[in-house]
Amino acid sequence: MYRPVLRVPDFPTLEREVLRFWEENRIFDKLREQTANGSPWSFLDGPITANNPMGVHHAWGRSLKDMYQRYHAMNGHALRYQNGFDCQGLWVEVEVEKSLGLQTKRDIRHYGIEKFVRTCKERVLTYAARQTEQSIRLGYWCDWDDPKLLLALRDALADGDRVVTAKLPSGRTETARASEIIRKLGSPEYGGSYFTFSDENNYTIWAFLKKCHNQGFIYRGHDVMPWCGRCGTGLSQMEVAEGRRITTHMSVFVRFPVKGQEGTALLVWTTTPWTLMANVAVAVNPDMTYLKIRHGDWMYYVAKTNFERNRIQELQVEGKHETHTLPSIRAILKGTGSVEVLEELPGRDLLGLTYEGPFDEFPAQNLPGGVFPYGVTGLGRASAESHLVVAWSQVSEAEGTGLVHIAPGCGAEDQQLGKENDIPFIAPLDESANFLQGFGQFTGRNANAVADDVVAALKASGRLVARERYPHVYPHCWRCKEELVFRPVDEWFIRMDWRDRIRRLVPTIKWIPPEGESREQDWLRNMGAWMIA
Ligand SMILES: [Zn+2]
């Protein structure tokens, strides 16, 4: 009555038998015929990036999607069964750059943007075909393109955009240049998976941007933002949050001699020594207590709590939790000489002091108005002439010396503080995070590769007081893992004034499921200016 069953079931063989049965008996086609007159149920697929073979985590998600579709088909609905492939963005570009051995944006321009875009499309077609094969093997029912057709289109595109004859999932046959067919993949007359590189998708995005532009929501901005020198691009806050990692940097304690107070200096601390070349000001908290201390031949200003207390570093990122106890600044200084506290004073007494910066010999420090990489130079005094101690309520007792080195061209908060105090702006890096002209021996070198040489230069000029390996959470590029820098961008933004208008529209939409409404509101609430890039 029953066929014998293997004691240890051979699942791969069983699966292939089921797939063969489905194919030989056209089971999927029969299901679609059966439900053709049912009420429509439309699943909108969030597309998988066609950049590599599918991983197990993709297979999980796809199995769930398949289950939903099957469930609704079993209830008699007519479904669209359209899978999507995401073809755009840096995921694809970074892989193509690797395969071509390109290092920077400039390399891409040299290679040729059109050729590069074509190579990206070829990669997408390669992996769309692969992921289609994998999905079919998974048993996922969709209106699939023939993987062999996708590969044939790829080869014809690579081979001078040959004319091909394509049999499409809708049953239609088309003879045209490969590029003509590729740009219409997924359209209603072709059927099959949708591809985000389609004309329809691209022109819709441009149409949306045009609408924004007509209403005055698009502007060109120069805000200081996190930047990846390797990818040559700015990163959004969301992207930065993905690349935060615990990193140990060489931090330095540097003396900035106070003008008019012989033998007295500000004790300044930073974890990014390269930014010292762009130093313009020093910030103190007017309401914190500071000390004047003697250490060897010098007297320093330093915040009292920071000076006396061991520094506890609680680092928490991506499930990792580390606690580091670092010695007090007093203990660090004691290692190289005796320390004596001379007097206590409020931070406000330091406001308005002027000082000699650590790299005032560089031409960049002596240019009126400073350095701006996008061709607009501000007017006014040079940085070296105007180094000033300014007030900033964000200076805390938790970190550093309580005297914060301010480089408006290397940090968003610094930029803001610079604007408030009308001080020069020095942005030292180009798009690849290499130093621009005017930075002495560092010109042309990468910001992430100069830390040791900056320390050596500070030592040679007698500015280095101490150094310390300092663990902290630092942002990295989520795509290529490079450490990020901060620099002004030259980008187009969508002004978020329209946010409130959209928020008023949100409740008028029928949300399926209903919790979509609060998600959308949350997303809009948390959105800053939107960089188009
Ligand atoms: Zn990167």
Image (spheres, rainbow, N blue to C red):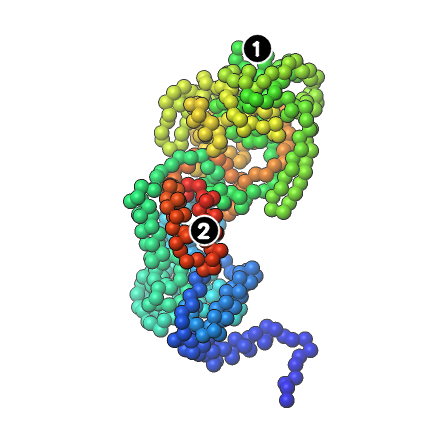
Element class at badge 1: loop
The residue at 70%/17% (across/down) is: 338
- The residue labelled by disc 2 is 520
Q: Where's the C terminus, which quadrant?
A: top left
Q: Residue furthest bottom?
A: 1
Residue depicted at x 59% and y 12%: 263
- Lateral position of residue 316 relative to residue 281, left or right: right
For disc 2, the neighbor class at 10 Å (few under 14, some 14 to 19, many from 20) is: some
Residue 128 location (% of width, % of height): 45, 62
User: Residue 106 sits in which quadrant?
Assistant: top left
- Judged by depth in the image, the label closer to the viewer, 2 or 1, is 2
Examine the rendered structure and indicate whether residue 54 appears above or below residue 247: below
Specify few, some or many for label 1: CA neighbours under 10 Å numbering under 14, 14-19, or 20 or more: few
What kind of residue is marked 1?
A: Glu
Q: Position of residue 146 (x, y in %)?
A: 42, 69
Q: Amino acid at mark 2?
A: Glu
Label whose residue precedes the other's in the sequence (2 or 1): 1
Q: Nearer the viewer, residue 16 or 417?
A: 417
Tell me what residue is drawn at x 51 percent, y 42 percent.
Answer: 240
- What count of labels does the image hold? 2
Q: Which residue is mark 1?
A: 262
User: Which residue is located at x 47 percent, y 27 percent?
Assistant: 417
The reply to whether the residue tagged 2 has its Cβ within 8 angstroms of ligand 1 is: no
- Residue 293, quarter of the rendered image: top right
